[in-house]
C-alpha cells in the first residue's frame, strides 16, 4: 500500500467506526490540552488516558495499579515540568519518571497535552511506517525516548507531506495496522 492524503483520510473514517472510545477521545482532545495548560486536569483525567492507551491490553489493571501507586504531588510536579519543557525528548523524559508511564504511555499523555504537536507511539502505526519505508527497523520491545523522537519525526514529515493533522495520521495508521 502507498500512503496518500486520500488513503489517510479514508482510514480516519475507518478508525472512527472501529474505535469504541472515539466520541470520548474526541471530547478529551478538545478539553484536555487546555486543562493541562491551565493546570486544571484531574487524577481521573490521567487515569482515563492510561485506560485509553491500554484499551485492548490484558495488563491495564497492573498499569493502573502502578500508576496509582505514585504520589499525587510528584505526578503533579512531573506534569507541570512536562508542560513547561520545550523539547519533545525532555517532555517525554519527565513523564517516564512516573511509575507506570513508559515511553508508549508517555506519548499518549503528550497527545492529550498537545495533539497538534504530538502523536501516540503505537505498535500498529509503527508497523505501517516500517512496512512503507518511513522507519528503518521494527519497533523495539522497549522503545526509548530516542525511538519516540524518530517515530515522531517520521509522523511530522508524513503529516506535512500529505497535508493531514497528526491526529488524522495516527488514526489512519492505527486502522491500517489491522489486528497486529
Image (cartoon, helix red, strand yellow):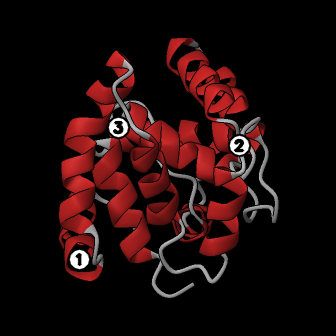
| Residue plotted at (51% across, 80% down) | 56
User: On screen, 45 above or below 5?
Assistant: above
**Which-is-in-front pick, marks 3 and 2?**
2
Res. 115 image quadrant: top left
Residue 163 visible in the displayed image: no
Q: Circle 1 is placed at which residue position?
A: 14
For label 2, the SS is loop
In the image, 9 versus 68, the foreground residue is 68
User: On screen, 164 above or below 179?
Assistant: above
| Residue plotted at (22% across, 37% down) | 31
Q: Which mark is residue 70?
A: 2
In the image, 42 versus 51, the foreground residue is 42
Crowd class of label 3 (few under 14; some 14 to 19; many from 20; radius 10 Å): some
Q: Position of residue 39 (x, y in %)?
A: 39, 20
Most distant residue in the bottom direction:
179
Q: Which mark is residue 115?
A: 3
Judge left or right: residue 18 versus residue 94: left
Number of numbered discs: 3
Amino acid at each position: 500500500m502507498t500512503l496518500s492524503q486520500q488513503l489517510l483520510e479514508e482510514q480516519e473514517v475507518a478508525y472512527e467506526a472501529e474505535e469504541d472510545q472515539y466520541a470520548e477521545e474526541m471530547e478529551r482532545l478538545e478539553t484536555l490540552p487546555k486543562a493541562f495548560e491551565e493546570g486544571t486536569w484531574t487524577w481521573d483525567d490521567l487515569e482515563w488516558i492510561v485506560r485509553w492507551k491500554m484499551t485492548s491490553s490484558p495488563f491495564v489493571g497492573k498499569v493502573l495499579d502502578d500508576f496509582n501507586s505514585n504520589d499525587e504531588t510528584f505526578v503533579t510536579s512531573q506534569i507541570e515540568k512536562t508542560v513547561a519543557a520545550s523539547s519533545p525528548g525532555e517532555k517525554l523524559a519527565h513523564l517516564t519518571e512516573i511509575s507506570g508511564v513508559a515511553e508508549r504511555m508517555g506519548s499518549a499523555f503528550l497527545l492529550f497535552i498537545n495533539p497538534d504537536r504530538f502523536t501516540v507511539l503505537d505498535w500498529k502505526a509503527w508497523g505501517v511506517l516500517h512496512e512503507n519505508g518511513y522507519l528503518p527497523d521494527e519497533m523495539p520491545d522497549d522503545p526509548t525516548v530516542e525511538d519516540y523522537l524518530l517515530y515522531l519525526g517520521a509522523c511530522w514529515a508524513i503529516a506535512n507531506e500529505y497535508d493531514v493533522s497528526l491526529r488524522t495520521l495516527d488514526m489512519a495508521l492505527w486502522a491500517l495496522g489491522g489486528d497486529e
